[in-house]
């Protein structure tokens, strides 16, 4: 049984008939969400700047997926993305604003030169706000929908390092909650997912240098030691949360942030019992 046959055999119908856009869908959390949505019957537009990986994903997903090259820092490209989904799939029911970048990690805030501030805010905040607005404009005139914005526990819990990234993710949560109030009258729901300690390439990208992955592993190990659940999270765990927020099971849920973090935002365990 090949990968596509196995995927088709495991398909459900929770999102049958729905059209979704997932930004930053070529890798990591976005990829897992796109895959999960397709398995549940949705048609999905895979949006990313990484053409090669995105096209490979679409080829694996089959006719229910299409690729649209999109840099979410450009409002014009997001406008084209929403139009593409409507034109090619006939509508838009779910918008997942997942694309994001991390800033450089400095040892001290006093050393941060803010060289990446504009880019981080353009992708992580402006991209989410414009994606939310343009999706909501369509949804408000077509019976409502679900908008899911991917933030981070880095915007929920204070800590050292990547201050611009933390600020951007905190901003996403507050904007999403505020927009949810305004859009409720149109039956457009807006919620956030805050992943924590999910192994992706985002952390390593903030480090740079030959030892980036090794340093990232050390940081993840430190985070894991302060996480109540012993097991590591996966992109698929985040995709399950996105599925819940995208479908009818969450029809009375809006303006909330759902941490997918093994309990990290609840508090640190006093001790880890040996198995």
Image (tube, helix red, strand yellow):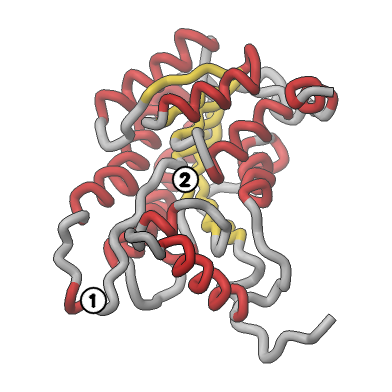
Label tally = 2
Q: Residues within 10 Å of mark 1 (few under 14, many from 20)?
A: few
Residue for point 61% across, 59% down = 260
Residue 269 percent coordinates (x, y): 66, 85
Q: Quadrant of residue 99?
A: top left
Residue 50 percent coordinates (x, y): 41, 31
Viewer-closest of 219 and 244: 219
User: Mark 1 and mark 2: span between their CA atoms?
Assistant: 27 Å
Instruction: Say what secondary structure mark 1 lies in.
Output: helix
Locate residue 137 relative to residue 196 in the image: left or right: left
- Locate the N terminus by quadrant: top right
Q: Quadrant of residue 3?
A: top right
Which mark is on residue 13? none
Q: Do we see residue 37 in this rendering?
A: yes
Label 1 or label 2, whichever comes before in sequence order = 1
Asked if marks 1 and 2 touch (Cβ < 8 Å), the reply is: no
Locate residue 261 relative to residue 153 in the image: left or right: right
- Locate the C terminus by quadrant: bottom right
Q: Quadrant of residue 44?
A: top right
Residue at the spot of label 1: 109
Instruction: Say what secondary structure mark 2 lies in.
Output: strand
Residue at the spot of label 2: 149
Residue for point 69% across, 35% down = 248
């Amino acid at each position: 049984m090949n990968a596509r046959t196995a995927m088709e055999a495991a398909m459900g119908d929770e999102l049958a008939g729905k059209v979704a856009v997932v930004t930053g869908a070529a890798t990591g959390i976005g990829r897992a969400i796109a895959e999960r949505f397709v398995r549940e019957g949705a048609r999905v537009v895979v949006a990313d700047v990484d053409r090669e990986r995105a096209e490979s994903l679409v080829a694996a997903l089959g006719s229910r997926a299409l690729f649209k090259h999109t840099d979410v820092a450009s409002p014009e490209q997001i406008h084209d993305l929403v139009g593409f989904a409507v034109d090619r799939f006939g509508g838009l029911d779910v918008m997942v604003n997942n694309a994001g970048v991390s800033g450089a990690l400095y040892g001290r805030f006093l050393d941060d030169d803010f060289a990446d501030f504009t880019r981080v805010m353009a992708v992580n905040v402006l991209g989410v706000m414009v994606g939310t607005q343009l999706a909501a404009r369509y949804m408000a005139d077509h019976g409502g929908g679900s908008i899911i914005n991917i933030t981070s526990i880095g915007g929920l819990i204070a800590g050292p390092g990547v201050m611009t990234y933390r600020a951007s993710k905190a901003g996403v949560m507050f904007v999403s909650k505020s927009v949810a109030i305004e859009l409720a009258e149109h039956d457009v729901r807006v919620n956030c997912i805050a992943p924590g300690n999910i192994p992706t390439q985002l952390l390593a990208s903030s480090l740079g240098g030959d030892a980036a992955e090794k340093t990232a592993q050390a940081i993840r190990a430190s985070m894991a030691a302060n996480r109540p659940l012993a097991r590591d999270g996966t992109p698929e765990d985040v995709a399950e949360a996105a599925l819940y927020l995208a479908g009818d099971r969450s029809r009375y849920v809006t303006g909330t942030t759902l941490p997918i973090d093994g309990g990290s935002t609840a508090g640190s365990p006093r001790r880890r019992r040996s198995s």
